[in-house]
Amino acid sequence: MVKDSAVLDGVFHALAHEARRDMLRRLAGSELSIGELAAPLQMSFAAASKHVKVLEDAALIRRTVIGRRHLCRLRPEQLSGASAWLRFYEQFWDARLDALEQVLENPISSNPEETT
């Protein structure tokens, strides 16, 4: 259980930064080099490499070194634990959204004369 918790903590830590979420989104389309991951984010190779290391430590990506190129590939299976954790809590926000929908569809008037 502790190992599972550590894995989940690593995934959520990796997902906590906007740049890393963007990298994962783009890696869903194809394998990219660290330079290609860095370019649209306007960050240095060194900064991008640090983000890639966080994603790699969380096992969300696999990095392959070919000569001087570091190619990254998405490992989506690691997201399943985070998805399952979020799905459990979905019941709570679904109930609240359903209640909000009811209130919005059937507003209660604060003026008692309007209800008669």
Image: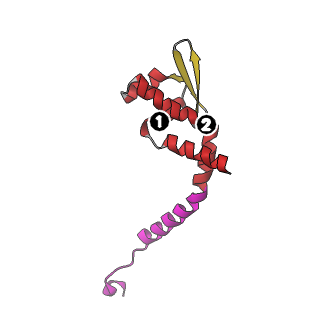
Residue that mark 1 sits on: 20
Q: Is residue 7 left or right of residue 22?
A: right
Which residue extends farthest right? 1
Check contact, mark 1 vs mark 2: CB within 8 A: no
Q: Which picture quadrant has residue 77?
A: top right
Give coordinates of residue 84: x percent, y percent.
63, 51
In the image, residue 77 above or below residue 31: below
In the image, residue 66 above or below residue 4: above
What secondary structure do most residues of the magenta stretch adopt?
A: helix
Give coordinates of residue 74: x percent, y percent.
58, 31
Q: CA distance from mark 1 to mark 2?
A: 14 Å
Image quadrant where one finds the C terminus: bottom left
Q: Which mark is residue 76?
A: 2
- Kind of residue at disc 1: Arg
Q: Earlier in the sequence, mark 1 or mark 2?
A: 1
Give coordinates of residue 96: x percent, y percent.
50, 66
Residue at 43% in and 39% down: 18
Q: Is residue 14 left or right of residue 5?
A: left
Specify whether residue 37 is painted magenta.
Answer: no
**What residue range appears in magenta?**
88-116
For the residue pair 109 and 58, the one nearer the viewer reads as 58
- Kind of residue at disc 2: Pro
> Dot 2 surroundings within 10 Å: few (below 14), some, or many (20 or more)?
few
> Dot 1 surroundings within 10 Å: few (below 14), some, or many (20 or more)?
many
Q: Is residue 33 left or right of residue 4?
A: left
Q: Which picture quadrant has residue 48?
A: top left
For the residue pair 21 and 53, the one nearer the viewer reads as 53
Give coordinates of residue 81: x percent, y percent.
63, 46
Residue at 50% in and 30% down: 52
